[in-house]
Image (tube, rainbow, N blue to C red):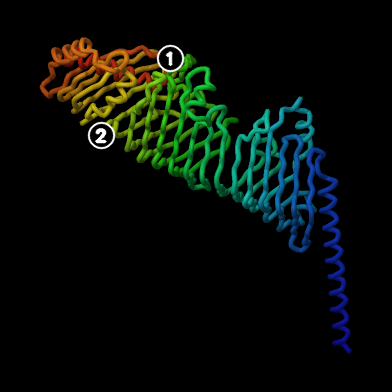
Amino acid sequence: MLRSKKVKIALWVLVVLLAVGITAQLWFTQRVKALLSEELPSHIKLSYNRLTTNVLLGKIGLQKVTFQDSTTSLDLKAETVTLSGLKYLPLLQKGAIALSDFTVEAPQVTYQKKKLENDSLTTKQNQGESKNISIQNFRIHNGQLKVLQQDSDSTLVQIDGLDVLLTDINHNTETASHPLPFTYGEYEIQTQKGHYDLGPWEYLQWQSFQLDSSEGRIQKLVLRTKYSREELSKKLTVEHDHYNLVIDSLLLKQPNFGLTDHLPKFHLKALELHHPVFQVYRDKLLPDDTKHKKLYNQALRDLDLDLLVNTIKISDGTVAYEERLEADVTPESLRFTAISATIRNLHSKGIGMVSVAARSQLMGNGQLTLDWSFDPQSQSNDFLASGSLKQFRTENISPFLRTNLGAEVKGTIDQMYFTISGNEVESQGDMKMAYDQFEFVVLKKDKLGVNKLLTALVNIFAKESSKADGDGFRHGDFKVKRQTDKSFFNYLWLNVKNGLVDTMTGKGKQRKK
């Protein structure tokens, strides 16, 4: 009898628990439905095909979700959105939302920032007290992101195969006023191919990308001009380089980004670029672009970005440069191969010198070095550069000189050294060179024959004044006024060219200081 009574009590308890559970489940489902349909801001529209809930697990699942925010033109379509591990005690006590997991499957996101007539809508949205929201793990799996240009429907950014993990997300009244309205802990981002429109002429794309708190990797990064060389020339009103840059892989070590003093921050311990191939073409038949060209000091200093990269390493690089000077002459390339370089302390708002040490092969055989340093905070844009060229067989550069300077050279430069110091306005330097059977050939204007008179005069000056020092070097020095509508590398070339002329045709001996 006693046993029967205990069984009845247990059954009643079970029935009560079931009733309470079913009631709680029904209430929870209805409360979620009401929240999603009635309590969202007016500028947000949300629809879905199916809702599933589990009150015991604190789980909410939506299928075939469509989300729209009219203030930012944000449209989202997702296969599923799942919230789990909802904690009831903070919700009941303080109205705070605390979740273990928030997962979005296969979202397709389209975003376009709108120009608002005024900030009244934004102000109204921010007047209410922000809820405390915490999420232990936020995940996006197999997403697609498309960002449209502000004034058109053309694509600014498109990313496929987007996977994201953010941990320890927290949003509260304090963070709501920040440009990024939440804090987070660890992160992992992976994408498949991506595309970024850089403006009217170039675009950037990549094959794959991954980034976490310790390092990042990019495979097959490409920067290209949108048009062919011929098409670009037809569209331009002033000269603009045609680019084709392909980098096999990039490695980013210890990335640190965010905001400092309302400026975007991008800091790296190290950046490694493997096998970059950069082809540059310039159509000199177009009018010159006479805008002032910033030296690298000023270009870095003026960046609206807190940039700091401790070390950049470039390996196995290639640069090829071509200029079109005549309509019916195919331009030849100036080529730098086997490039290795180290750049240290690259910064925009920091302190200290940026230093560059580069090594390469000029036209496949000459050993070329360049060491260059400058301070981005120098208002006069001071810089110091030095370099050398060894064992260079000059006939390899003759095709380029033939089409670009109307000249050819013969012989070998055994050793050449130069040093240049300069600023925004002018520069000066010195050079020494040892060579073997070096000879200039000056061509006629049509480049179809040799200008024998000029060739003879140039080589008479070179031979008669070639009084080398005891080590076989001839010396020269030079001064150059900067052409401010030209790039730094044009400035560097003017110094080297003037140094060559003075070394070849000057007195040869080192001048007394």
Residue 513 seen by the camera: no
- Residue 433 in which image quadrant: top left
Say whether disc 2 or disc 1 marks the residue closer to the N-terminus: 2
Residue lying farthest to the left in this orientation: 470
In the rendered view, would you say 417 is above or below 39?
above
**Quick one: quadrant of the C terminus?**
top left
Mark 1 residue type: Thr
Q: Mark 1 highlights which residue?
A: 484
Q: Nearer the viewer, residue 266 or 148?
A: 148
Q: Contact (CB < 8 A) between labels 2 and 1? A: no
The answer to whether one can see residue 76 in this image is yes
The amino acid on which the numbered mark 2 sits, given as a three-letter code, is Asn
Closest to the observer: 500 or 117?
500
Label 1 Cα crowd, 10 Å radius (few <14 / some 14-19 / many 20+)? some
Q: Residues within 10 Å of mark 2 (few under 14, many from 20)?
A: some
* Picture coordinates of residue 417, whole percent (x, y): 24, 25
Image x and y of residue 217, in percent: 48, 46
Image position, residue 471 (x, y; %):
12, 24
For label 2, the SS is loop
Residue 71 position, x and y percent, is: 75, 34
Name the quadrant of the N terminus.
bottom right
Identified at 72% across, 46% down, the residue is 132
Towards the viewer: 292 or 352: 292
Residue under pointer 2: 365
Q: What distance separates the C-alpha of mark 2 from that of mark 1?
A: 33 Å
